[in-house]
Amino acid sequence: MSLLRHTSTIAGFTIISRIFGFVRDILLARVLGAGLAGDAYQLAFTLPNTFRRLFAEGAFSVAFVPMYSRRLAGENGEEAAARFADDVLSVFVWILLAFSAFAMLIMPGIVWLLAGEFQSVPGKFDLAVFLSRVTFPYLFFISIVAMLTGLLNARSRFAPGAIAPILFNIVLIGGIGAGYVWRGHSGDDRWVVYALSIAVSLSGLVQLVYLWWEVHRAGLKFHLQMPKFTPEVKQLGMVILPATFGAGIYQISQFVDTFFATQLPQGSLTLLKMADRLNQMPLGIVGIALGTAILPMLSRHIQSNDLQRAQDLQADAFEMATLLTLPAAAALAICAPAFTNAFFVGGKFTLADGAIMANITAALVAGLPAYVIVKILNPGFFARSDTKTPVYTALISLIFNIILNVFVVRPWGIVGLAGATAASATLNCLLLYFVLHRRGWFHFTGALGNRVARQLLATAAMSALLWWMLGWMMPYFSDDILTRIAALAILVGGGMAVYFAVGYMVGALDRERINRLLRRNRAAAN
Protein backbone atom coordinates (compact mmCIF):
# COMPACT_ATOMS: atom_id res chain seq x y z
CA MET A 1 0.00 0.00 0.00
CA SER A 2 1.72 3.18 -1.22
CA LEU A 3 0.06 5.46 1.36
CA LEU A 4 1.32 3.29 4.20
CA ARG A 5 4.79 3.02 2.67
CA HIS A 6 5.14 6.76 2.05
CA THR A 7 3.67 7.65 5.43
CA SER A 8 6.03 5.21 7.14
CA THR A 9 9.02 6.79 5.39
CA ILE A 10 8.03 10.29 6.46
CA ALA A 11 7.00 9.19 9.95
CA GLY A 12 10.21 7.22 10.50
CA PHE A 13 12.47 10.19 9.85
CA THR A 14 10.04 12.49 11.67
CA ILE A 15 10.32 10.29 14.76
CA ILE A 16 14.10 10.73 14.67
CA SER A 17 13.64 14.48 14.25
CA ARG A 18 11.17 14.63 17.15
CA ILE A 19 13.57 12.72 19.38
CA PHE A 20 16.29 15.29 18.64
CA GLY A 21 13.71 18.04 19.16
CA PHE A 22 12.71 16.50 22.47
CA VAL A 23 16.35 16.49 23.59
CA ARG A 24 16.61 20.12 22.46
CA ASP A 25 13.60 21.13 24.55
CA ILE A 26 14.80 19.24 27.63
CA LEU A 27 18.16 21.01 27.45
CA LEU A 28 16.47 24.36 26.83
CA ALA A 29 14.14 23.94 29.80
CA ARG A 30 16.94 23.03 32.17
CA VAL A 31 19.36 25.71 30.93
CA LEU A 32 16.86 28.61 30.67
CA GLY A 33 13.82 27.65 32.73
CA ALA A 34 10.62 29.70 32.41
CA GLY A 35 11.76 33.30 32.82
CA LEU A 36 12.57 36.55 31.03
CA ALA A 37 15.12 35.23 28.53
CA GLY A 38 13.08 32.09 27.89
CA ASP A 39 9.94 34.08 27.04
CA ALA A 40 11.89 36.45 24.76
CA TYR A 41 13.45 33.54 22.88
CA GLN A 42 10.14 31.68 22.56
CA LEU A 43 8.59 34.74 20.93
CA ALA A 44 11.59 35.16 18.61
CA PHE A 45 11.38 31.47 17.68
CA THR A 46 7.60 31.59 17.21
CA LEU A 47 7.62 34.36 14.59
CA PRO A 48 9.63 32.77 11.73
CA ASN A 49 8.51 29.27 12.69
CA THR A 50 4.82 30.16 12.52
CA PHE A 51 5.25 32.02 9.23
CA ARG A 52 7.08 28.92 7.97
CA ARG A 53 4.16 26.67 8.81
CA LEU A 54 1.64 29.19 7.58
CA PHE A 55 3.20 30.14 4.24
CA ALA A 56 6.01 27.78 3.28
CA GLU A 57 4.77 24.40 4.52
CA GLY A 58 1.14 25.46 4.63
CA ALA A 59 -0.27 27.64 1.88
CA PHE A 60 2.64 27.37 -0.55
CA SER A 61 2.92 23.58 -0.35
CA VAL A 62 -0.79 22.86 -0.70
CA ALA A 63 -0.98 25.22 -3.69
CA PHE A 64 2.31 24.40 -5.41
CA VAL A 65 2.38 20.58 -5.13
CA PRO A 66 -0.98 19.91 -6.92
CA MET A 67 -0.19 22.40 -9.72
CA TYR A 68 3.31 20.98 -10.17
CA SER A 69 1.98 17.39 -10.04
CA ARG A 70 -0.62 18.11 -12.73
CA ARG A 71 2.03 19.51 -15.07
CA LEU A 72 4.28 16.57 -14.33
CA ALA A 73 1.50 14.13 -15.24
CA GLY A 74 0.40 16.07 -18.34
CA GLU A 75 1.74 16.40 -21.86
CA ASN A 76 5.48 17.20 -22.00
CA GLY A 77 5.41 16.62 -18.24
CA GLU A 78 9.03 17.10 -17.27
CA GLU A 79 9.56 20.13 -19.47
CA ALA A 80 6.31 21.84 -18.39
CA ALA A 81 6.95 21.09 -14.71
CA ALA A 82 10.54 22.38 -14.89
CA ARG A 83 9.44 25.61 -16.60
CA PHE A 84 6.74 26.12 -13.97
CA ALA A 85 9.23 25.53 -11.12
CA ASP A 86 11.74 27.98 -12.62
CA ASP A 87 9.07 30.68 -12.99
CA VAL A 88 7.84 30.20 -9.43
CA LEU A 89 11.33 30.18 -7.90
CA SER A 90 12.35 33.34 -9.75
CA VAL A 91 9.36 35.23 -8.33
CA PHE A 92 9.29 33.49 -4.95
CA VAL A 93 12.90 34.40 -4.05
CA TRP A 94 12.31 38.15 -4.45
CA ILE A 95 9.02 38.10 -2.57
CA LEU A 96 10.68 36.27 0.31
CA LEU A 97 13.60 38.69 0.43
CA ALA A 98 11.29 41.70 0.41
CA PHE A 99 8.98 40.26 3.06
CA SER A 100 11.86 39.24 5.34
CA ALA A 101 13.57 42.64 5.06
CA PHE A 102 10.31 44.48 5.71
CA ALA A 103 9.45 42.30 8.72
CA MET A 104 12.88 42.83 10.25
CA LEU A 105 12.55 46.58 9.72
CA ILE A 106 9.19 46.82 11.51
CA MET A 107 10.01 44.12 14.09
CA PRO A 108 9.45 46.45 17.09
CA GLY A 109 5.87 46.94 15.89
CA ILE A 110 5.31 43.22 15.37
CA VAL A 111 6.61 42.37 18.84
CA TRP A 112 4.49 45.18 20.32
CA LEU A 113 1.35 43.76 18.67
CA LEU A 114 2.01 40.24 19.95
CA ALA A 115 3.70 40.95 23.27
CA GLY A 116 3.25 44.59 24.23
CA GLU A 117 3.09 43.47 27.87
CA PHE A 118 6.83 42.66 27.65
CA GLN A 119 7.45 46.41 28.00
CA SER A 120 6.44 46.19 31.66
CA VAL A 121 9.56 44.10 32.40
CA PRO A 122 12.83 46.05 31.99
CA GLY A 123 14.89 44.78 29.05
CA LYS A 124 12.43 42.05 28.00
CA PHE A 125 10.85 43.87 25.04
CA ASP A 126 14.19 45.01 23.58
CA LEU A 127 15.64 41.52 23.94
CA ALA A 128 12.62 40.01 22.16
CA VAL A 129 12.97 42.49 19.26
CA PHE A 130 16.70 41.82 18.85
CA LEU A 131 16.30 38.03 18.97
CA SER A 132 13.38 38.14 16.52
CA ARG A 133 15.51 40.02 14.01
CA VAL A 134 18.28 37.46 14.38
CA THR A 135 15.97 34.48 13.86
CA PHE A 136 13.84 35.87 11.02
CA PRO A 137 16.23 35.05 8.11
CA TYR A 138 15.33 31.43 8.87
CA LEU A 139 12.01 32.05 7.10
CA PHE A 140 13.75 32.85 3.78
CA PHE A 141 15.89 29.72 3.84
CA ILE A 142 13.17 27.34 4.98
CA SER A 143 10.66 28.65 2.44
CA ILE A 144 13.00 27.67 -0.40
CA VAL A 145 13.45 24.34 1.38
CA ALA A 146 9.66 23.89 1.30
CA MET A 147 9.59 24.40 -2.45
CA LEU A 148 12.43 21.95 -3.05
CA THR A 149 10.68 19.44 -0.78
CA GLY A 150 7.50 19.87 -2.82
CA LEU A 151 9.37 19.04 -6.04
CA LEU A 152 10.65 15.81 -4.52
CA ASN A 153 7.31 14.93 -2.88
CA ALA A 154 5.57 15.22 -6.27
CA ARG A 155 7.93 12.47 -7.43
CA SER A 156 7.17 10.37 -4.32
CA ARG A 157 10.63 11.08 -2.88
CA PHE A 158 9.58 11.91 0.67
CA ALA A 159 12.72 11.05 2.64
CA PRO A 160 14.82 14.23 2.02
CA GLY A 161 12.06 16.56 3.22
CA ALA A 162 11.63 14.44 6.34
CA ILE A 163 15.38 14.35 7.03
CA ALA A 164 15.83 18.15 6.89
CA PRO A 165 14.20 18.83 10.31
CA ILE A 166 16.73 16.45 11.89
CA LEU A 167 19.46 18.85 10.76
CA PHE A 168 17.46 21.73 12.22
CA ASN A 169 17.35 20.15 15.68
CA ILE A 170 21.01 19.12 15.61
CA VAL A 171 22.08 22.70 14.86
CA LEU A 172 19.84 24.06 17.65
CA ILE A 173 21.24 21.57 20.15
CA GLY A 174 24.67 22.84 19.19
CA GLY A 175 23.42 26.39 19.76
CA ILE A 176 22.26 25.52 23.29
CA GLY A 177 25.64 23.98 24.04
CA ALA A 178 27.51 27.00 22.69
CA GLY A 179 25.29 29.37 24.66
CA TYR A 180 25.79 27.39 27.84
CA VAL A 181 29.57 27.64 27.41
CA TRP A 182 29.42 31.36 26.57
CA ARG A 183 27.28 32.04 29.61
CA GLY A 184 30.04 30.55 31.74
CA HIS A 185 29.95 31.65 35.34
CA SER A 186 28.24 34.98 34.67
CA GLY A 187 24.79 33.44 34.89
CA ASP A 188 23.52 35.83 32.20
CA ASP A 189 20.94 33.88 30.20
CA ARG A 190 21.18 36.33 27.31
CA TRP A 191 24.29 34.50 26.07
CA VAL A 192 22.23 31.32 25.70
CA VAL A 193 19.44 32.97 23.70
CA TYR A 194 21.94 34.88 21.53
CA ALA A 195 23.56 31.61 20.51
CA LEU A 196 20.20 29.90 20.04
CA SER A 197 18.83 32.65 17.80
CA ILE A 198 21.92 32.54 15.59
CA ALA A 199 21.52 28.76 15.42
CA VAL A 200 17.91 29.10 14.21
CA SER A 201 18.91 31.07 11.11
CA LEU A 202 21.98 28.90 10.55
CA SER A 203 19.82 25.77 10.63
CA GLY A 204 17.73 27.14 7.75
CA LEU A 205 20.86 27.59 5.64
CA VAL A 206 22.05 24.05 6.48
CA GLN A 207 18.67 22.58 5.41
CA LEU A 208 18.70 24.60 2.18
CA VAL A 209 22.14 23.31 1.22
CA TYR A 210 21.07 19.73 1.92
CA LEU A 211 17.79 19.94 -0.06
CA TRP A 212 19.51 21.68 -2.98
CA TRP A 213 21.97 18.79 -3.12
CA GLU A 214 19.13 16.22 -2.98
CA VAL A 215 17.25 17.96 -5.80
CA HIS A 216 20.35 17.92 -8.00
CA ARG A 217 20.90 14.29 -7.06
CA ALA A 218 17.40 13.58 -8.37
CA GLY A 219 18.39 15.05 -11.72
CA LEU A 220 16.43 18.30 -11.38
CA LYS A 221 17.96 21.63 -12.31
CA PHE A 222 16.90 25.21 -11.74
CA HIS A 223 17.47 28.33 -13.79
CA LEU A 224 17.20 31.54 -11.81
CA GLN A 225 15.99 34.23 -14.18
CA MET A 226 14.35 37.61 -14.18
CA PRO A 227 11.01 37.31 -12.39
CA LYS A 228 8.03 36.94 -14.71
CA PHE A 229 4.43 36.87 -13.56
CA THR A 230 3.26 34.24 -16.00
CA PRO A 231 -0.40 33.13 -15.98
CA GLU A 232 0.64 29.99 -14.04
CA VAL A 233 2.48 32.04 -11.40
CA LYS A 234 -0.51 34.37 -11.10
CA GLN A 235 -2.79 31.37 -10.69
CA LEU A 236 -0.51 30.02 -7.96
CA GLY A 237 -0.65 33.38 -6.21
CA MET A 238 -4.44 33.42 -6.35
CA VAL A 239 -4.50 29.98 -4.74
CA ILE A 240 -1.87 30.82 -2.10
CA LEU A 241 -3.60 33.92 -0.74
CA PRO A 242 -6.74 32.19 0.55
CA ALA A 243 -4.84 28.97 1.30
CA THR A 244 -2.64 30.95 3.68
CA PHE A 245 -5.64 31.30 5.93
CA GLY A 246 -7.38 28.03 5.14
CA ALA A 247 -4.37 25.80 5.75
CA GLY A 248 -3.13 27.78 8.70
CA ILE A 249 -5.79 27.85 11.41
CA TYR A 250 -3.44 26.12 13.80
CA GLN A 251 -0.64 28.53 12.97
CA ILE A 252 -2.84 31.62 13.13
CA SER A 253 -4.10 30.38 16.48
CA GLN A 254 -0.48 30.29 17.59
CA PHE A 255 -0.31 34.08 17.18
CA VAL A 256 -3.59 34.47 19.06
CA ASP A 257 -2.34 32.19 21.84
CA THR A 258 0.98 34.06 21.97
CA PHE A 259 -0.83 37.37 22.41
CA PHE A 260 -2.98 36.08 25.28
CA ALA A 261 -0.07 34.17 26.89
CA THR A 262 2.07 37.31 27.08
CA GLN A 263 -0.68 38.95 29.15
CA LEU A 264 -0.21 36.28 31.84
CA PRO A 265 2.55 35.95 34.49
CA GLN A 266 6.16 35.73 33.28
CA GLY A 267 7.08 32.26 32.07
CA SER A 268 3.57 31.45 30.79
CA LEU A 269 4.63 31.73 27.14
CA THR A 270 7.60 29.41 27.70
CA LEU A 271 5.45 26.80 29.47
CA LEU A 272 2.82 26.95 26.71
CA LYS A 273 5.42 26.44 23.97
CA MET A 274 7.08 23.59 25.87
CA ALA A 275 3.72 21.84 26.33
CA ASP A 276 2.87 22.39 22.69
CA ARG A 277 6.10 20.67 21.74
CA LEU A 278 4.83 17.51 23.49
CA ASN A 279 1.59 17.89 21.58
CA GLN A 280 3.56 18.32 18.35
CA MET A 281 5.27 14.93 18.76
CA PRO A 282 2.33 12.81 17.53
CA LEU A 283 0.98 15.66 15.38
CA GLY A 284 4.25 15.88 13.45
CA ILE A 285 4.78 12.14 13.22
CA VAL A 286 1.25 11.21 12.14
CA GLY A 287 -0.56 14.32 10.90
CA ILE A 288 2.16 15.95 8.85
CA ALA A 289 3.29 12.59 7.47
CA LEU A 290 -0.22 11.67 6.32
CA GLY A 291 -0.98 15.14 4.97
CA THR A 292 2.29 15.25 3.03
CA ALA A 293 1.82 11.78 1.56
CA ILE A 294 -1.86 12.13 0.68
CA LEU A 295 -1.82 15.44 -1.25
CA PRO A 296 0.08 14.44 -4.42
CA MET A 297 -1.63 11.02 -4.50
CA LEU A 298 -5.08 12.56 -4.07
CA SER A 299 -4.33 15.14 -6.77
CA ARG A 300 -3.48 12.37 -9.24
CA HIS A 301 -6.67 10.40 -8.47
CA ILE A 302 -8.82 13.50 -8.91
CA GLN A 303 -6.97 14.49 -12.09
CA SER A 304 -7.75 11.05 -13.57
CA ASN A 305 -11.37 11.28 -12.26
CA ASP A 306 -10.90 8.13 -10.15
CA LEU A 307 -13.21 9.31 -7.35
CA GLN A 308 -13.53 5.92 -5.64
CA ARG A 309 -9.78 5.66 -5.15
CA ALA A 310 -9.78 9.21 -3.81
CA GLN A 311 -12.46 8.23 -1.29
CA ASP A 312 -10.60 5.07 -0.30
CA LEU A 313 -7.33 6.99 0.09
CA GLN A 314 -8.89 9.52 2.48
CA ALA A 315 -10.67 6.76 4.41
CA ASP A 316 -7.41 4.85 4.85
CA ALA A 317 -5.67 8.03 6.00
CA PHE A 318 -8.49 8.76 8.45
CA GLU A 319 -8.26 5.25 9.92
CA MET A 320 -4.48 5.45 10.24
CA ALA A 321 -4.78 8.87 11.89
CA THR A 322 -7.24 7.78 14.58
CA LEU A 323 -5.43 4.47 15.13
CA LEU A 324 -2.37 6.38 16.37
CA THR A 325 -3.70 9.70 17.65
CA LEU A 326 -6.52 8.45 19.88
CA PRO A 327 -4.15 6.48 22.17
CA ALA A 328 -1.48 9.19 21.89
CA ALA A 329 -3.90 11.87 23.08
CA ALA A 330 -5.15 9.74 25.97
CA ALA A 331 -1.65 8.71 27.02
CA LEU A 332 -0.29 12.28 26.91
CA ALA A 333 -3.24 13.62 28.89
CA ILE A 334 -2.94 10.98 31.63
CA CYS A 335 0.85 10.72 31.76
CA ALA A 336 1.72 14.42 31.34
CA PRO A 337 2.87 14.74 35.00
CA ALA A 338 5.18 11.77 34.53
CA PHE A 339 6.70 13.13 31.32
CA THR A 340 7.26 16.64 32.65
CA ASN A 341 8.78 15.43 35.93
CA ALA A 342 11.00 12.84 34.30
CA PHE A 343 12.29 14.93 31.41
CA PHE A 344 11.96 18.64 32.10
CA VAL A 345 12.15 19.27 35.84
CA GLY A 346 15.72 20.07 36.84
CA GLY A 347 18.20 22.94 36.62
CA LYS A 348 16.22 26.16 36.22
CA PHE A 349 12.95 24.31 35.50
CA THR A 350 11.13 23.88 38.83
CA LEU A 351 8.55 21.37 40.09
CA ALA A 352 5.94 24.14 39.99
CA ASP A 353 6.80 24.78 36.33
CA GLY A 354 6.42 21.08 35.63
CA ALA A 355 2.98 20.91 37.26
CA ILE A 356 1.67 23.82 35.19
CA MET A 357 3.18 22.40 32.01
CA ALA A 358 1.47 19.04 32.66
CA ASN A 359 -1.94 20.72 32.94
CA ILE A 360 -1.34 22.71 29.75
CA THR A 361 -0.36 19.53 27.92
CA ALA A 362 -3.52 17.72 29.04
CA ALA A 363 -5.66 20.60 27.75
CA LEU A 364 -3.84 20.85 24.42
CA VAL A 365 -3.99 17.15 23.55
CA ALA A 366 -7.77 17.16 23.90
CA GLY A 367 -7.67 18.54 20.37
CA LEU A 368 -4.89 16.28 19.07
CA PRO A 369 -7.15 13.99 16.98
CA ALA A 370 -8.72 17.08 15.40
CA TYR A 371 -5.31 18.62 14.64
CA VAL A 372 -4.29 15.47 12.79
CA ILE A 373 -7.58 14.86 10.97
CA VAL A 374 -7.56 18.43 9.65
CA LYS A 375 -4.27 17.53 7.93
CA ILE A 376 -6.03 14.81 5.93
CA LEU A 377 -9.29 16.70 5.30
CA ASN A 378 -7.71 19.88 3.91
CA PRO A 379 -6.06 18.06 0.95
CA GLY A 380 -9.57 17.05 -0.16
CA PHE A 381 -10.17 20.72 -0.96
CA PHE A 382 -6.69 21.74 -2.07
CA ALA A 383 -6.40 18.83 -4.53
CA ARG A 384 -9.51 20.27 -6.24
CA SER A 385 -8.06 23.82 -6.15
CA ASP A 386 -10.78 24.84 -3.68
CA THR A 387 -9.13 27.10 -1.15
CA LYS A 388 -12.18 29.22 -0.33
CA THR A 389 -13.99 26.67 1.80
CA PRO A 390 -11.11 26.11 4.24
CA VAL A 391 -10.91 29.90 4.54
CA TYR A 392 -14.50 30.08 5.74
CA THR A 393 -14.15 27.22 8.21
CA ALA A 394 -10.86 28.60 9.48
CA LEU A 395 -12.36 32.06 9.96
CA ILE A 396 -15.26 30.66 11.97
CA SER A 397 -12.89 28.58 14.11
CA LEU A 398 -10.50 31.47 14.68
CA ILE A 399 -13.30 33.79 15.81
CA PHE A 400 -14.56 31.02 18.08
CA ASN A 401 -11.05 30.66 19.54
CA ILE A 402 -10.71 34.38 20.25
CA ILE A 403 -14.13 34.56 21.92
CA LEU A 404 -13.32 31.52 24.07
CA ASN A 405 -9.99 33.03 25.11
CA VAL A 406 -11.71 36.22 26.25
CA PHE A 407 -13.87 34.18 28.63
CA VAL A 408 -11.52 31.42 29.81
CA VAL A 409 -8.07 33.05 30.14
CA ARG A 410 -9.00 35.20 33.14
CA PRO A 411 -10.45 32.40 35.35
CA TRP A 412 -8.26 29.48 34.14
CA GLY A 413 -5.12 31.23 32.92
CA ILE A 414 -2.76 29.49 30.54
CA VAL A 415 -4.56 26.13 30.90
CA GLY A 416 -7.82 27.71 29.76
CA LEU A 417 -6.02 29.19 26.76
CA ALA A 418 -4.75 25.73 25.77
CA GLY A 419 -8.25 24.27 26.09
CA ALA A 420 -9.68 27.00 23.85
CA THR A 421 -7.10 26.15 21.17
CA ALA A 422 -8.11 22.48 21.29
CA ALA A 423 -11.83 23.35 21.07
CA SER A 424 -11.35 25.63 18.05
CA ALA A 425 -9.34 22.96 16.21
CA THR A 426 -12.13 20.45 16.86
CA LEU A 427 -14.71 22.85 15.46
CA ASN A 428 -12.59 23.39 12.34
CA CYS A 429 -12.33 19.64 11.84
CA LEU A 430 -16.11 19.14 12.11
CA LEU A 431 -16.85 21.96 9.68
CA LEU A 432 -14.40 20.67 7.09
CA TYR A 433 -15.85 17.16 7.23
CA PHE A 434 -19.44 18.46 6.99
CA VAL A 435 -18.64 20.31 3.75
CA LEU A 436 -16.71 17.39 2.23
CA HIS A 437 -19.58 15.04 3.04
CA ARG A 438 -22.22 17.39 1.70
CA ARG A 439 -20.40 17.77 -1.63
CA GLY A 440 -19.88 14.02 -1.97
CA TRP A 441 -16.08 14.32 -1.87
CA PHE A 442 -15.59 12.20 1.23
CA HIS A 443 -17.96 10.34 3.54
CA PHE A 444 -17.56 8.51 6.81
CA THR A 445 -18.57 4.92 6.04
CA GLY A 446 -20.06 2.39 8.43
CA ALA A 447 -16.94 0.24 8.17
CA LEU A 448 -14.74 3.20 9.09
CA GLY A 449 -17.00 4.17 11.99
CA ASN A 450 -16.94 0.60 13.28
CA ARG A 451 -13.15 0.54 13.16
CA VAL A 452 -12.86 3.87 15.02
CA ALA A 453 -15.30 2.65 17.69
CA ARG A 454 -13.09 -0.39 18.28
CA GLN A 455 -10.06 1.89 18.49
CA LEU A 456 -11.84 3.87 21.20
CA LEU A 457 -12.47 0.65 23.12
CA ALA A 458 -8.78 -0.25 23.00
CA THR A 459 -7.89 3.32 24.01
CA ALA A 460 -10.21 3.07 27.03
CA ALA A 461 -8.52 -0.16 28.16
CA MET A 462 -5.09 1.43 27.83
CA SER A 463 -6.21 4.56 29.67
CA ALA A 464 -7.50 2.55 32.63
CA LEU A 465 -4.14 0.78 32.94
CA LEU A 466 -2.14 4.02 32.68
CA TRP A 467 -4.30 5.74 35.30
CA TRP A 468 -3.77 2.85 37.71
CA MET A 469 -0.03 2.63 37.05
CA LEU A 470 0.52 6.38 37.40
CA GLY A 471 -1.06 6.39 40.84
CA TRP A 472 1.71 4.32 42.43
CA MET A 473 4.60 5.06 40.03
CA MET A 474 4.63 8.87 40.29
CA PRO A 475 7.45 9.10 42.92
CA TYR A 476 9.80 7.20 40.59
CA PHE A 477 9.64 9.98 37.96
CA SER A 478 11.49 12.36 40.30
CA ASP A 479 14.22 9.86 41.25
CA ASP A 480 17.64 9.37 39.66
CA ILE A 481 18.00 9.21 35.88
CA LEU A 482 18.10 5.42 35.59
CA THR A 483 14.99 5.05 37.75
CA ARG A 484 13.17 7.64 35.65
CA ILE A 485 14.05 5.85 32.42
CA ALA A 486 13.00 2.48 33.81
CA ALA A 487 9.71 3.86 35.16
CA LEU A 488 8.88 5.52 31.84
CA ALA A 489 9.76 2.35 29.91
CA ILE A 490 7.37 0.35 32.10
CA LEU A 491 4.61 2.96 31.80
CA VAL A 492 4.88 3.45 28.04
CA GLY A 493 5.54 -0.21 27.31
CA GLY A 494 2.59 -1.35 29.40
CA GLY A 495 0.24 1.13 27.74
CA MET A 496 1.32 0.20 24.23
CA ALA A 497 1.08 -3.52 24.93
CA VAL A 498 -2.47 -3.23 26.25
CA TYR A 499 -3.62 -0.93 23.43
CA PHE A 500 -2.33 -3.09 20.59
CA ALA A 501 -3.32 -6.37 22.28
CA VAL A 502 -6.88 -5.22 22.97
CA GLY A 503 -7.00 -3.48 19.60
CA TYR A 504 -6.05 -6.70 17.82
CA MET A 505 -8.59 -8.75 19.79
CA VAL A 506 -11.54 -6.41 19.22
CA GLY A 507 -10.64 -5.67 15.59
CA ALA A 508 -9.42 -2.10 15.97
CA LEU A 509 -6.43 -3.14 13.85
CA ASP A 510 -7.01 -4.49 10.36
CA ARG A 511 -5.80 -8.07 10.85
CA GLU A 512 -5.88 -8.88 7.14
CA ARG A 513 -3.76 -5.84 6.31
CA ILE A 514 -1.30 -6.62 9.13
CA ASN A 515 -0.95 -10.24 8.02
CA ARG A 516 -0.49 -9.10 4.42
CA LEU A 517 2.28 -6.71 5.47
CA LEU A 518 3.93 -9.40 7.57
CA ARG A 519 3.86 -11.83 4.65
CA ARG A 520 5.34 -9.14 2.40
CA ASN A 521 8.13 -8.44 4.93
CA ARG A 522 8.92 -12.17 5.26
CA ALA A 523 9.05 -12.50 1.49
CA ALA A 524 11.39 -9.51 1.27
CA ALA A 525 13.63 -11.02 3.95
CA ASN A 526 13.89 -14.26 2.02
Image (tube, rainbow, N blue to C red):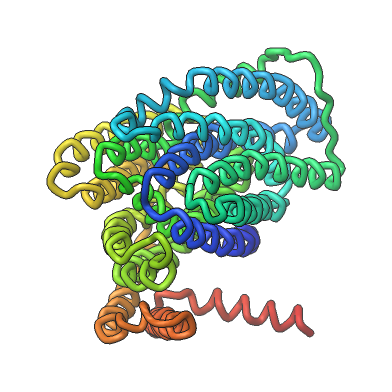
How many numbered marks does the figure carry?
0
Residue at the spot x=39%, y=35% of the render?
124
- In the image, is residue 188 above or below residue 502? above
- In the image, is residue 60 above or below residue 329? above
Q: In this view, does 204 lie to the left or right of 39?
A: right
- In the image, is residue 435 above or below residue 508? above
Residue at the spot x=47%, y=29% of the render?
129
Residue at the spot x=73%, y=46% of the render?
155
Q: Can residue 223 be seen in this view?
A: yes
Residue 395 pos. (x, y %): 32, 30
In the rendered image, the quadrant that contains the C terminus is bottom right
Residue 443 pos. (x, y %): 38, 50
Within the image, what quadrant is residue 356 found in? Answer: bottom left
Closest to the observer, 4 or 223: 223
In the rendered image, the quadrant that contains the N terminus is bottom right
Q: Can residue 430 be seen in this view?
A: no
Closest to the observer, 206 or 152: 206
Residue 490 pos. (x, y %): 42, 85
Within the image, what quadrant is residue 254 found in? Answer: top left
Closest to the observer, 13 or 519: 13
Residue furthest front in the image: 185
